[in-house]
Structures are given as C-alpha cells and as structure tokens.
Amino acid sequence: MDSHRSRRRRRLALAAFVAASVAAAAAISTVLAAGADPILSKGAGAATHTAANAGQGRWAIPPSRSRQPPPRRRPTSSTSCSGRTGSGRCAPFLPRGPSAIGRRRRHGGGRWCGASAAAEGAGAASSSPSWSCVVLGDLHLDPDDMEAHHEARGQLLNLLEHPEVRSPPGTRRVLSLGDLGAYGSAGTTASFEHARDYLDGFGLPLSIVTGNHDLEGMHEFATDRENLDRWRGVFGVEGEWGQFATEVAPGVLLVGLSTEGFRSNPFSSHEVRIGDGQMEWFEAVLAAHPLEEGWSIVVASHAPPMGSGLRVLNSVHVRNTCAWLNHAAGPAGRRFFHRAARSHGGIVCWLSGHFHLSHDYEESISVVRGTHPGAVSAFCQVGVIGPTSTRDGRRQSRILSSDGRTLKVWSVDHHVQGVQSDFERLRLDLEIPLSLPDRAKRAARGERIAPAPLPASVAIRPGSEAWFSAQTPREGDGCYLPIQSPSGEEEEKLLVDQDTEGAVCWWHMDNGAVLGIHDGMLLEYDAETLAPLGVLVSKEDLDGRMVEVAEDGIQVKLVADNKSSGPEESDVLTISPNENGSYFRIFQTNKWLRWKREQEQQAA
C-alpha cells in the first residue's frame, strides 16, 4: 500500500510539473510573440526566475505548482570520498529493493560513487552550475606506442580552455568509457596500471566504467569477479559492479554502468552485459533523482542501449550479438535501458563507445523522445584516439560542457593535421537544454532538438565495408506480410521486389518477430526498438536465393531465384525459430570456454 501511495504521489507530482512546464512554455511563447524580454513574472502557470538559480539560466516552477530547486548535498564525513575516490560529490548509497528510496531519504550513510580523484577538484564538487568533461572512447593503450595518445591528451587539455568550454577549477573531469589495454594484454593488472598512469596525466578527477576487453585477463584471473575486483582496486571504484554516480554540478548527475561479464556470458564474451543487481541499482538511482525535482542525468556505458537510434554499427557486432547492452539477454534485459531512459525523462545524454567509429556519420548522435512532453535523450557515439584502433581512419574524442542551462556536446578531431591552433579541432555537434521547462519552451516554438548538420567536407557516406548502417522498418520501404485491417480485410504491403538492387525488405512475422534483408543479409530486428538483433543468413548463404514465408507465418524458406547459376530449384532451405522464439544464429561462442577447451586439449 505504501509503495502504491508513493508511486501515486510521484505520478501526481510529475503531472503537476509537466503541466507547469507546458504552461511556462506557453507563457514564454506569448511573451516572445509580443517582442518583450522573455523573463517570466510570478502568476498562475508562470515560472519564476528565483534568486537561488539567478545567473544559472535555470527556470524554477513556483513551489505551489510543482517543485523546489534540487537539493545541493554537501559531503559529510560519512559521504565524502577519500583517496582515489575523492573526486566530485558522492551521493549516498542506494540499497536494493522496492523500499530503497525511502531508506535513502532517512539514512545518509555509505557511498555509491566510483569516481577516481586526481590533482584538480578532489573533495566536494563546486556549487558552480558550469562544468566540463573530457570523454574518452576505447583507449587500447599500448605501452610501446603512446605518441598519439599523449598528443591527444595535450590537445584535450588545451581545449578545456576554449572560451565556450572553459569552466571554473574544480568543475572539470575526465570520463573513460573502458577498453583500456592493448589487444593481447587487455584486462590484466599491468594494463590497468598503465591506463591509470595515463589518465592521471590529465590532472583531473576521473570517472570510469569497464568495457568488454577490461575483463579479458584470462591468463591472470579465473573468474569475472576476480578480474573486476582488480580493476576496481586499481582505480578505486567502490561500486560493487563497477558502477558509479557523481553529482558534477547542482542538479546534474553523472552515472556510469560497467560490464560485469566475459567468461560468464552465455554467447559472445564481448557482449557488454549488465547484471540484475546493477540494473536494480540503476533503477533506484533514477527513482531517487526524478524529473519532477529538476534532475538532469548523463549516463555512460561502454556499449549503447538497444533502441538508442545509433544506426552506424560494426557488422561484426551485429553478427556476434554484442552491439548493444545486454544484446543477447532476452527481450526484457535488452530493452530495459531504452525503456528506463524514455520513462524517466531526465536522462538528457547517454555516452558510449565500443564501435571504434568516428562522429562523422549523420547518425552518430541520435535524439530520442521520451514519454513526457518535452523530454528527449541524446545518445552519442564516442570515437577512438589510437591509429590502430580506428575502423574508419578518423580519430576523435568528445567534450561535454555546460553553463547550467544548456549541455553542449563537442567533437575533437585528433587526426586533422596542419591546424594553427588546437581550437580548430573543436566542433559543436549538439546543444540540449538541461531543464524540462526549457525543452518544453522549444517544443512550443516548434524547435526540434537535433544534432547540427555535418560539414560536407567531413561527412562519411554509405559505401564502406567497415561499418553497417542499420535500417529501420518504415511504411513503404520494403516487403511486408499481408496484415489485417480493422475491417478484417487483408492489405497487401509488398512494395519492392527482393531482387531489386539495394532493396530493403521487411517481414512482420505472425509470432511478433521482425525480419529484414539488408546489406545482402537476412537479419532479425528487435520487435519493440526495431534495432538489428542478429543474422539469420549471411551474404554468402543468401546469394542466389529468395526469401519466402511459409503458410504458418512463422517459418522462413530460402528458394532459388532462378536468375543465377547458384542453388537448384529443388534446393529449399527452411528456417524455424529457436527454442526461445528468436531467429538469429549464434556465430561466436564464448571465448573463455573456447580457450579452456584448447587448454584441456593441449594438456591431454
């Protein structure tokens, strides 16, 4: 009952907040239309620019209508971090379970911060609304080849002094998205210590999550737990699963999610797997920092969540079911993060690496609408620094900066030569208001929050085999099964022949699955997010065949297309769903299990 009442109170508070946001947007639109200065006065449905947030550009809703400004927690002896975990402001630990939020509000002990301290800014975070953060993708640091990474570190530190990026001392930090060690030595103690020394060279507080290769120390550690604990020890991360949450500015929370599995993954070891405990923790963090209290949340994970809208992927990640968070974990597990972002409404930015691809694709940033009016989440791909790590020849990092009102997402070009100043390496990719009232105001004015257009001189167009541009089923761009109209009559949706060059065909199966031909392969797509899930038939096996759906609407048949010298007409292959209802095939088994078998064979 208490849980029901608590949820009902939160829903009522959110409804009041959204109503006030919409009213604020309408009032702003009216003022702007009249040509007046857009400063809101007190009154019914109007927002108040209070003294508490004057100069920060944050609009506060009158308390009678909605919320008080978010509390500014000051660390005490029980909540401040020390040693390598002393950067920024650490929020209290959130116990697991349905009553976690109530316990959090009664008890302030413990910590759940995983940030690592360096020279600047250790201790309590500044109360300044301005902040900046260097974001590093997959590092794969090779001790014998560090020149490019040292150069990039200097460039990034110089760019923190750019007039549009600069924030006061104590408000700057660096965020690493994992995959620290070079191929062949990743996941070892030596790789962690080498990466720590490199990251300490920034002289900034560090926040860090694990990537799939960070648990690959198979010769040194027998279990994922041992490997993860060594990583935690080297970087001083206190989160049980390598997770962290740090308040980087008043009302702005940076949250990190770490992969926990490599040896224990059911299929590909390189799937970025988040376990049930960490998912419960994340859910509790979101509940403790609700939209109606004005929180803005930035999330970091090594791989992006399914449903992020990032469509430029590595084809090998799609084939091996390791492109997304919890890619092969089943529908509920792989959709959890997308659903959480949309329903919370306050996750303004989600950063991820993993693909080793640059920011020079139209879809390297995707803005997804939430379930609340004006709520959007920007999912941002982060490139790599190392010349041996890049898959498209571009080397890039990101910088986040904020004045307290707007979050700016920047690209930094490390590969560009001949610039007169490092400032020329900086490119603004996205601006997003941090407060829901500001986003509602833009929506009322018909302004869509979207990435800035890429300069034609740098934009990468389709055609490279190094990447895979996922398509999304849309009305009129492919082959559909006949579907029932409301009157019960079938509506034919077959619009493009399969043998049309470049055709993208879709089948919505009777069991709810979605299949499609794209890039010469037969793929399965997640039915809710319409993101690529896995490969049924490779290019080689599909060559010279047509796809037909059996009369039961569930089985798929591959028949000869009669236009090539390939398969005989009688050569028909039938594909049935897997036991769990999915169709995609497992091409890559667990690396740890393969290695163990090899060890046993050698011993025998």
Image (spheres, helix red, strand yellow):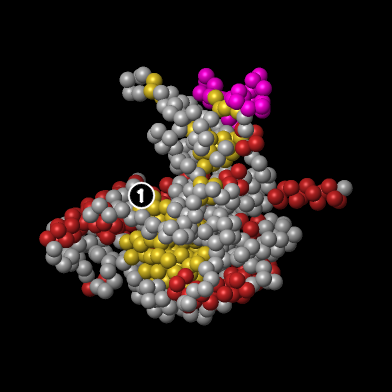
**Relative to 13, residue 168 above or below:** below
Q: Position of residue 600 (x, y in %)?
A: 82, 49
The residue drawn where x is 49% and y is 74% is 419
Residue 157 shows in the view? yes
- Prevailing secondary structure class for the magenta stretch in the rendered image: loop
**Relative to 26, residue 37 above or below:** below
The residue drawn where x is 54% and y is 67% is 415
Viewer-closest of 514 and 512: 514
Viewer-closest of 540 and 250: 540
The residue drawn where x is 20% and y is 58% is 24
Q: Position of residue 573 (x, y in %)?
A: 64, 25
Viewer-closest of 370 and 420: 420
**Relative to 566, residue 464 above or below:** below
Crowd tier of the residue under label 1, counting other residues whose Cα lies within 10 Å: few below 14, some 14–19, many 20 or above: many
Residue 408: name its quadrant: bottom left
Q: Position of residue 585 (x, y in %)?
A: 62, 37
Q: Label 1 sits on what residue type?
A: Gly
Identify residue for label 1: 370
Residue 543: name its quadrant: top right
| Element on which disc 1 rests | loop
The residue drawn where x is 65% and y is 56% is 224
**Residue 567 on the magenta span:** yes
Q: Which residues are magenta?
A: 549-578
Q: Position of residue 88 (x, y in %)?
A: 45, 73
Classify residue 342 as left or right of residue 357: left
**Residue 5 on the magenta span:** no
Classify residue 22 as left or right of residue 404: left
Classify residue 276 as left or right of residue 43: right
Residue 205 shows in the view? no
